[in-house]
Amino acid sequence: MHRFFLIIICFFVSFCNAQLQNSKWYFGANAGLDFATSPPTLITNANLNTSGGMSSISNAAGNLLFYTDGVTVWNSLHQVMANGTGLLGTISALQNVVITPSATNASIYYIFTSTPFFKTSVDMSLAAGLGSVVTKNQLILNGAIPNVIAGVGCNVVQAFSRNNSNHFEMQTGEVFNGTTYTNSVSSFTTQGSYLDKWLKVSPNGYLWALIAEKPGSGFGFYAVEIRNRFLLLDPTAYSPPLVLTAGTGLGDLFACEFSPDGTKFYVSSPGTKQLYQWDLCAGSNTAIIGSLQTFTTGNTSIYGMQVAPDGKIYCASNPSLSVINSPNLAGASCGFSLQQQSIGNASCGLTLPNFCSGFIQNNLAPLSFSSQSINCTTFSFVPLSPSTFSNCFASAQGISSVLWNFGDPTSGAANTSTLWSPAHQFSAPGTYTVKLVVRRICQKDSVVQTVGSAGPWPDISLSGNFTICKNGSAVIIASGANSYTWSNNATGSVLTVSPANSSTYSVLGLNSNGCTKLTTFSVNVQPLPVIVLTGNFTICANGSAAINATGANSYTWSNNATGSVLTVSPVNSGTYSVLGVNINNCQSTKVFTFSVVPCTAMNVVSSNQVGIIIYPNPSQGVFLVEIKQRMQVSITDLSGSSVYKSQLAIGSHNIDLSKYADGVYLLEATNENGSQVIRLIKE
């Protein structure tokens, strides 16, 4: 029985995401693929011939540096590297070796082998750039299991192996020191009754998975676990593992692999000729376990699996490799294809190269977002990369939070948002700088973009007659927008209204980019002139009359005369009118009638002494008085009470006694020629 003991060697680096570092694959019996091309091309010059594990490393440009089976190291010329023999890796183990870069020296690489857990150093600056092994088989952990893996995430590379009972964790890069602690987390694989068969690290370095087999069970009892916090340096923070399966239900389980985005997890079962998939972002543990998908591999047995730089998962099978073409997708959409990738006349054995997982993860696309105008001042925003929100820590794109700053402090609390796809109404037209901050598992990304101007609003112009006369109509014309809605619900660019009194109106203009502007205006209603006419409207035949108009600023009479006084000598009774216009250019018409009477002796009273003629007399109330010389006129009733008194100028005058009782009245006319009393009869 193995005693499980965990050791993690941490190297803090910032260059481990270059996928071309694992572009040259050497495996099996002289098999090889070059992923610097698409599709990959065959490599036929390898010296490797092994049924166990192997690892290789290239530079950032994809040029081969060296490869190893855990016992021998070959350089880029496929020659044994200087001092490159005698490594103590277990040649038959399937994950016996992995290569990682140094954290502090770009020329130094480390080869980790098991069992035990050894470290060998390679200096690529030696041997004219072909490299030399400078230290060999430095013991890290005695009695470790024959599985060694490496992962990268949060700019940390960790080489990993373990044994039971205790865990041991080391850090600080080149200096191997650390502390030993007891693992209190109970699981199948820490109870001492299982043996690790396959280990893998997730692309983001946050999770690690293992397949364990129970000895003596007839090789039919397996457990698959997903453990969190692979990169966590605080061992007390480990939480119980997620057990995807435990027992005989899925048959013999061989190898596992994470999809490039970390959201899907695959396990091979060569005995039952099945391939299994779980969705690690399905939600709860129960949902993840329930997301199991099964693919039948027909007559082909699938063994080891490895993600390649082209984003596909390649599966060890003979005579050709099987391929999961779209491993980030769930179910049949993953595109599992049997015997797809030829390896020529070579044989792949049971496994494929073992790489540091961070070399293979999906490179994070540059953070960006888009904006779209909802209306004039409101824009919606959505991140373009990543395209979906995910707080699933298995995901290489896993996001714990987003924060938007719209560069609009005037909007107050609305200037920021933690929504995935928010909308913001800008406080004024202009150009704004919007910032998106995305927090991932162990890093924070941000991007700043300029949002197109909010606005411009329509520039509404109004023309027309904003001042009208009572009973008139106003016609208002709007321009500067594409469509218009008036406050009385009328539409179109022209408004016609006839308000009884001065009124306020508004128009809402809408332009082509959805911006609106409300413009308010008033229509002032001016009063019509009230024309008052005075004068003698009853005249004798062959006589003349003078009519005086007031209440307007100008007058036009129906006989085309102008001015405030009309003097006429009508032959017959008739109707006249006067058009008055006030200061506001409002006008009204007054209609009046002249009565022409014969003025016989019976109804005319005259006095040559003082120069006065009165008619008709008797009258029904209105007496026409013609004055030939200025005089004082007073009228009394028979009791002596005064009913009229006035100084009359030369001309015609109307004296109206309509409101007085019928009867006899005495008119006294006085001027410098004397005084005369005339009797008036009202009937």
Image (tube, helix red, strand yellow):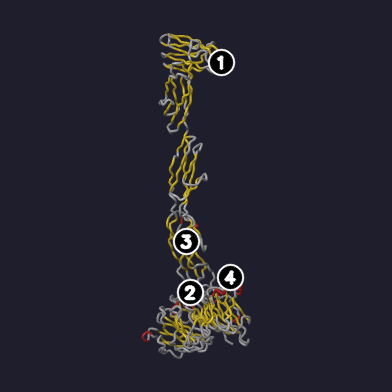
Q: CA distance from mark 4 to mark 2?
A: 22 Å
**In which quadrant of the rendered view does residue 195 lie?**
bottom right
Residue tagged 1: 661
User: Which badge, 3 or 4, comes first in the chain's sequence?
Assistant: 4
Q: Is residue 342 above or below residue 577?
A: below
**In which quadrant of the rendered view does residue 247 lie?**
bottom right
User: Which badge, 4 or 2, comes first in the chain's sequence?
Assistant: 4
* Residue 676 point in image, percent of width and height: 46, 9
Q: Is residue 163 above or below residue 428?
A: below
User: Which badge, 3 or 2, comes first in the chain's sequence?
Assistant: 2
Secondary structure at numbered mark 3: strand
Q: CA distance from mark 3 to mark 4?
A: 30 Å
Residue tagged 3: 371
Q: CA distance from mark 3 to mark 2?
A: 26 Å
User: Which badge, 1 or 3, comes first in the chain's sequence?
Assistant: 3
Secondary structure at numbered mark 1: loop
Pointer 2 with pointer 1, Cβ within 8 A? no
Residue 117 seen: no
Pointer 3 with pointer 4, Cβ within 8 A? no
**In which quadrant of the rendered view does residue 291 lie?**
bottom right
Give whichever of 548, 649 is nearer the camera. 548
User: Which badge, 4 or 1, comes first in the chain's sequence?
Assistant: 4
Query: In the image as oriented, which residue stretches furthest toward the left?
Result: 128
Query: Which numbered circle lies on residue 362?
Result: 2
